[in-house]
Image: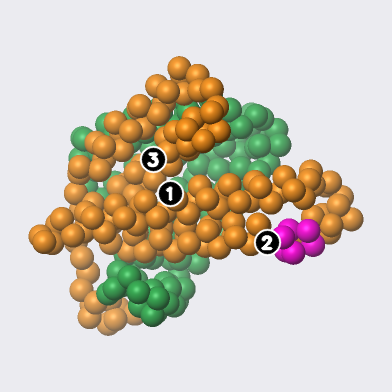
Chain colours: A orange, B green
Amino acid sequence: MGHELRIRIKTLVMILAMVVCANAGDLMLKRGMTKIGAVQISAPGLQHAFLATVTNGTIWIGIVFLAGFMLSYMTVLSWADYSYVMPAGAFGYALLTLLAVVFLHENVSPRRWIGVVLICVGVLLVGQTRPRTTEVVARETREVAA
Amino acid sequence: MRVALLLGVLILGSTGGEIAITHGMKATGEPERLRPRELLQFLTRAMRNGWFWAGVPLMALSFYSLLILLSWRPISFVIPASALSYVVGTLGAKYILLEDVSPARWIGVVLVCAGVALVAAG
């Protein structure tokens, strides 16, 4: 397999992991917080909310997913361009709309569908550019610099 | 006025933070393999990088601005407005990180920015 193709596949897999972890994490937090109920902005209210969140299993699953998002984001940025990863990550918004239609049978406005199409075309355009345009600094040089 | 100001903090905070982290990650270098052991070493190396720690407070700042904005305005205004960060981030990538942003990438970024604004506006 060519070097360029390997980088491309590796990058796409990490971006997919980012999108899945971020969405799953948000969903779990939303579920957990719905169970806990609206938070009162007062000292006893915040204290109650804090205790309720740190003892809630669903919230912890959400936190693990969000940590997974951060790790995959940091990892992919160690080799790929920021201007490649950032727009490609917006694919999550399109995915979320599709999931809402398929699983939750939500009604989606024409305006939102146009947005989904624009995101998909934009991500495809960015996706076919080279994932990395800056030169690779050799490990030895980095260690000397550090 | 205060909404516009906080939106500015939100956009500059998130893109500034992400650019600092990207810079730190490029200096860290990629993990040799995507296995737990190598990933752990990679994380430790990243944590020792100053740029990573410059990025974290900026991202925290943007997160709190987002929370405050969401308490002032509906999400269907806040997320579309913050979609501008795709364009600001790309400018930062080009002029600060010196990435080569080709015309195809620019068009893609603008489409994504408009698309996110439309999706979030409902």
Within-10-Å neighbours for mark 1: few <14, some 14–19, many 20+: many
Residue located at (24% from left, 36% from top): A125
> What main secondary structure does the magenta stretch of the protein show?
helix
Q: Which amino acid, mark 3? A: Phe
Residue A67 sits above or below residue B34 on the image: above
Residue located at (36% from left, 64% from top): A75
Q: Position of residue A56 (x, y in %)?
A: 72, 60
Q: Which amino acid, mark 2? A: Gly
User: Pointer 2: what residue?
Assistant: A57
Q: Position of residue B115 (x, y in %)?
A: 41, 28
Check contact, mark 3 vs mark 1: CB within 8 A: yes
Chain that bears disc 3: A
Q: How many marks?
A: 3
Q: Which mark is residue A19?
A: 1
**B102 horizontally vs A107: left or right:** left
Residue located at (47% from left, 37% from top): A99
**A86 horizontally vs A33: left or right:** left
Residue A19 sits above or below residue A145 on the image: above
The stretch in magenta equals: A51-57
Disc nearer the start of the sequence (2/3):
2
Q: Which amino acid, mark 1? A: Val
Q: Is mark 2 on a helix, strand or loop?
A: helix
Q: Where is residue A88 in the image (x, y as percent from the top left)?
A: 34, 44
In space, the residues marked 2 and 3 are separated at their CA atoms by 28 Å
Instruction: Tell me the quarter of the image containing the C terminus of chain A.
Output: bottom left
